[in-house]
Image: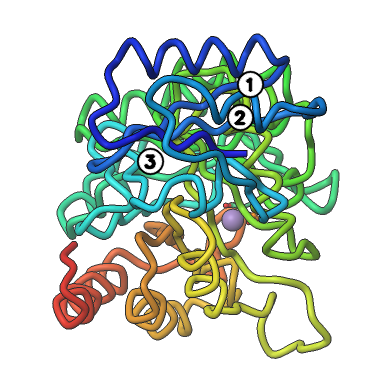
């Protein structure tokens, strides 16, 4: 439930109610809005909880949260969350552009890519060091050496680093190098991993599982939020359908739905969403027109020889053209890149 404080409630009253919520065996998430502060009280309620909170000093109302997800819900926080992580901002007027190779392959590859995407106007560099591959015989990533190369690229360009963490035991290691920890589609419902990410001071990019519903994505986000990490970015990356002309099916209606249900920012991955480099420009433009707060795009200096996902990766020139086109679309929807 939500404890809605009166406009002008004092800090003492807010602190008192936070303690009251905790005394009732619930977790308190204080959300300070421009007009009023609310305290989301999350957990198993006892009889009389609502009545007991309602008589607190400075309390305007106590209301139930109807959505199954709580902290992620617009019912709890009506203002959009802006997630900031180094040079990347997602959820505000600026559209956050994350670009880079599927996998970190060498110092030359990641540095050249970082410089090129930065020149084109990207805000963050992506690149997997720990790769979840469908086949155990495919390239599995450079692991910590890859993370060190990402750090070299950040030092050289100032770009924030977005990279995947595949296992709970790697969270601390990856957090030492990354500004944003990516949870891959295959791990969206790895609840121990999500809980571990809830306790760190790093933003999290949570990708939708290929067979997960959007509400399941929001419940997965809730695991991170409920542990106290409010910097969660949601990502639509395509789902598994009967359709075979694309690698996955990219439902852009997700963007619209999520903006009606949650305050969390939403980014779209047109690379995995289509699996074809030639479709990335069109879907990038469409995602921004649909209200996406950012894009995550695969870019490689030599897509033909990439160790993973080359067929959906853009060349530097193609990425530059995507940026030029996206700038125009952003302008048309009162945003900017
Ligand atoms: C990736 O971003 O390279 C990746 C593996 O994505 P996903 O988890 O969406 O398949
Ligand atoms: Mn990839």
Label 2 – label 3 distance at C-alpha: 44 Å
CA–CA distance in space, label 2 to label 1: 6 Å
Which residue sits at x=67%, y=41%? Answer: 131
Q: Earlier in the sequence, mark 2 or mark 3?
A: 2
Crowdedness near tag 3: few (<14), some (14–19) or many (≥20) residues, C-alpha within 10 Å = many
List x then y, in percent, for residue 141: 63, 36
Can you say whether 8 is above or below 246 in the image? Answer: above
Q: CA distance from mark 1 to mark 3?
A: 42 Å
- Give the mark, 2 or 1, whose residue is nearer the N terminus: 1
Decide: few, some or many residues near mark 2? Use Cα within 10 Å; few <14, some 14-19, many ≥20: many
Which residue is depicted at the point 75% across and 27% down? 48
Which mark lies nearer to you, 2 or 3? 2
Q: Which residue is mark 2?
A: 41
Secondary structure beneath dot 3 equals helix
> Which residue is label 1 attached to?
27
282 is higher (above) or lower (below) than 199: below
Q: Is residue 226 above or below residue 68?
A: above
x 44%, y 52%: residue = 263
- Image marks 2 and 1: residues in contact by CB distance under 8 Å: yes
115 left or right of 47 in image? left
> What residue is shown at x 54% (from left), y 10% (from top)?
19
Q: Is mark 2 within 8 Å of ligand 1?
A: no
Residue 234, how many percent across, how many down? 53, 52
Relative depth, front residue between 3 and 44: 3
Label 3 belongs to which residue? 110
């Amino acid at each position: 439930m939500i404890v809605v404080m009166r406009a002008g409630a004092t800090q003492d009253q807010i602190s008192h109610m936070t303690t009251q919520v905790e005394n009732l065996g619930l977790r308190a998430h204080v959300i300070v809005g421009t007009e009023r502060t609310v305290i989301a009280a999350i957990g198993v309620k006892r009889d009389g909880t609502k009545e007991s909170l309602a008589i607190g000093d400075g309390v305007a109302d106590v209301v139930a949260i109807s959505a199954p997800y709580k902290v992620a819900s617009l019912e709890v926080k009506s203002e959009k969350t802006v997630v900031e992580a180094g040079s990347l901002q997602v959820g505000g007027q600026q559209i956050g552009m994350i670009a880079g190779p599927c996998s970190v392959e060498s110092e030359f590859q990641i540095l050249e890519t970082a410089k090129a995407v930065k020149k084109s106007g990207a805000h963050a560099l992506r690149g997997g060091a720990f790769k979840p591959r469908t086949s155990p015989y495919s390239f599995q990533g450079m692991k910590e050496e890859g993370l060190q190369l990402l750090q070299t690229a950040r030092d050289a360009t100032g770009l924030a680093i977005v990279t995947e963490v595949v296992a709970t035991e790697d969270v601390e290691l990856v957090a030492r190098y990354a500004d944003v920890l990516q949870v891959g589609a295959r791990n969206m419902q790895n609840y121990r991993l999500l809980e571990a990410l809830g306790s760190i001071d790093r933003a999290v990019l949570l990708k939708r599982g290929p067979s997960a519903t959007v509400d399941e994505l929001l419940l997965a986000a809730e695991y991170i939020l409920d542990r106290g990490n409010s910097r969660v970015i949601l990502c639509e990356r395509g789902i598994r359908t009967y359709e075979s002309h694309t690698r996955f099916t990219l439902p852009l209606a997700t963007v619209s739905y999520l903006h009606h249900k949650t305050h969390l920012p939403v980014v779209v991955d047109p690379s995995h969403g289509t699996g074809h480099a030639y479709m990335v420009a069109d879907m990038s433009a469409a995602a921004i027109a649909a209200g996406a707060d950012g894009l995550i795009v695969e870019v490689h200096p030599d897509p033909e020889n990439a160790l993973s996902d080359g067929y959906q990766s853009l060349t530097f020139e193609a990425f530059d053209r995507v940026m030029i086109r996206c700038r125009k679309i952003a302008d048309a929807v009162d945003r900017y890149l």
